Amino acid sequence: MSVMGQGVRRPRRLVLHVVLVALAVAMLYPLVWMVASSVKPENEIFTSHSLLPTRAEFANYAHGWSGLGTSFGVFLGNSALIAALSIVGNLVSCSLVAYAIARLEFRGRRLIFAIMMGTVMLPQHVVLVPQYILFVKLGLTDTMLPMVLPKFLAVDAFFVFLMVQFLRGIPREMDEAAMVDGAGPWRIYRSVVLPQMRPALVTAAIFTFIWTWNDFFTQLLYLSSPAKLTVPLGLQMFLADTGQSSWGAMFAMTTLSLLPVVLVFVCFQKLIVEGASTSGLK
Amino acid sequence: MTTVEDVSTTREATAARTTRRRGRRLAGYAFLSPWFVGFAALTVGPMLASLYLSFTEYPILSPPKWVGLANYQRLLTDDPRFLSSLQVTFTYVVVSVPLSVAVALLVAVLLNRRVRGAGAYRSAFYLPSLLGGSVAVAILWRQVFGRTGLVNWLLGLFGLHGPDWVSDPRTALGTLILLHVWQFGAPMVIFLAALRQQPRELYEQAAIDGAGPLRRFAHLTLPLLSPVILFNLLLSMINGFQAFTPAYVVSGGTGGVSDSSLFYTLYLYQQGFTNFRMGYASAMAWVLFVIIAAFAALTFGTSRFWVHYGDER
């Protein structure tokens, strides 16, 4: 047994667990409270703080789903579509760029990669106003294109970095063999490199999903008509319109809106934590 | 067999190889073309444009009018809301960033001690950082710290009456700082990964030499982790300066009573997209850029006094 293991003796280990459990409960309690409140009758949310409702009911969900004239399903659909298109955009554009950087020889490669990494650090606010004006002039406000289009242009250079790192870690033998067989760069990319990159692609897809699903700022800027709104905007509108009056419905919809991220976390836990711990993804 | 073929067609092969190489070089640029377009149209172009706009008055409906340094001058000398937004943001960053990194470090060290169920704890602590940036959690926060919310109910059990934490100007910012610290899981997993890579022999040797857990933490763990601490501080700081969603949602977009939660980005949003003062908003964006760069440089500058890079290599 190691020294560290001996250091943690029985009573101490118990204390450690008590501390960790207490911390976990304190951190997750608000979320649990939210879920519990979402199935409580409206008048019980703030009067009884017991987690268990006298009887579970889903009236809050029905109320929240249709509460604003526009169905919450529309918001979910819009958010899902933006997320799906963003994932496609990021995977296609970032993998093309990463392949060029990691495997092809051309002048200025290092410099271009350095510039790319510089843009990762750039606060989005310094490009915000002109980008907004650009999309206004193109007549693209109140569409999802201002959110989606940049993804097809490898603007999330962070994922390029992730993929370049990944490609550098796998041997080039396969694409060299394909080259000897006369395959051009495009065929090598399509049939050799892309399949090998799968783990990096999955990680990029997961984080693109979480980021676009949670994104509020860009969507707030560009979307305005009710039928175009996304989940965060719908929730915000719900809050502004109903104020403090229908917390049950509010909690039902916030629960619903967090569910996809939680599910993704449960399914891809290992990849997410790996991605988060090796590169600061969040 | 291949060698025979090679010899017989050397010249053709060389020619083919050269064209292929040139083709590959061009291919590099072809593969990069999405990025070139994006970089020109969505990064460099807009950066130059916003720098120019920051010297103009631009109410979007009429063309920009050159005003020289007037926007910057007004920001620094004649805009009390700008100054309070700066103060709020500095307080937020200076308190919540070191605090969340410290909590992350502490919990990571505890989890690294071969506790049973470390994986489950890690997931529980990490989950909030995936959810924390969302509107849904900001709304939840508003309710947890509201007048009749969870926290005041808890205080009520002990006979205490809490304020309306989210709207009381004395505590509003505190609740947002807490929301940031709640997401300590992100730096924590980075610490955990780094801790796993630390050489065990060093710790064993130190224990044999009679160093207790606290001394081992201070003289081994901290120095070994210092580059990762720097990384987490920088990352968390850059994100902290740009925080928007919680302040917007918790205050309903206003910045709260007496601007107590008027984050910098929220004020920028108000100026640019509610008042449509695009020139002023651009100037604010560049000031933010300079502030972030300065803070990053400062943190980096001090790092040579406390960050230890492995010197055995």
Image (cartoon, coloured by chain):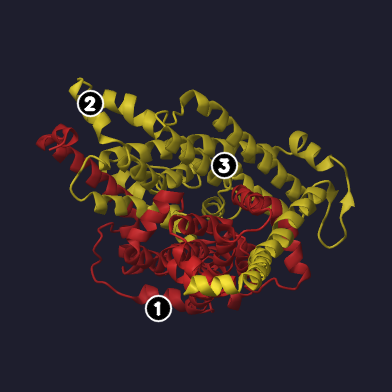
Chain colours: A red, B yellow
Q: Label 1 belongs to which residue?
A: A62
User: Which residue is at the front of the view, A135 or A58?
Assistant: A135
Residue A80, position as x, y percentages in the image: 50, 74
Residue lying farthest left? A10
Q: Residues within 10 Å of mark 3 (few under 14, many from 20)?
A: many
- Asked whether residue A244 appears in the rendered view, the answer is no
Q: Label 2 belongs to which residue?
A: B205
Q: Residue at x 62, y 71 (%)?
A: B13
User: Which residue is at the front of the view, B146 or A22?
Assistant: A22
| Label annotation for residue B157 | none
Direction from residue A269 to residue A257 in the image, left or right:
right
Q: Is residue B164 above or below residue A144?
A: above
Secondary element type, mark 2: helix
Q: Is residue A82 above or below residue B209?
A: below
Q: Nearer the viewer, mark 2 or mark 3?
A: 2
| Chain containing the residue with disc 3 | B
Secondary element type, mark 3: loop
| Label annotation for residue B260 | 3
Q: Residue at x 23, y 63 (%)?
A: A52
Residue A193, position as x, y percentages in the image: 49, 68
* Tag 1: amino acid: Ala
Secondary element type, mark 1: helix
| Chain containing the residue with disc 1 | A
User: Which residue is at the front of the view, B56 or B160?
Assistant: B56
- Same subunit, tags 2 and 3: yes
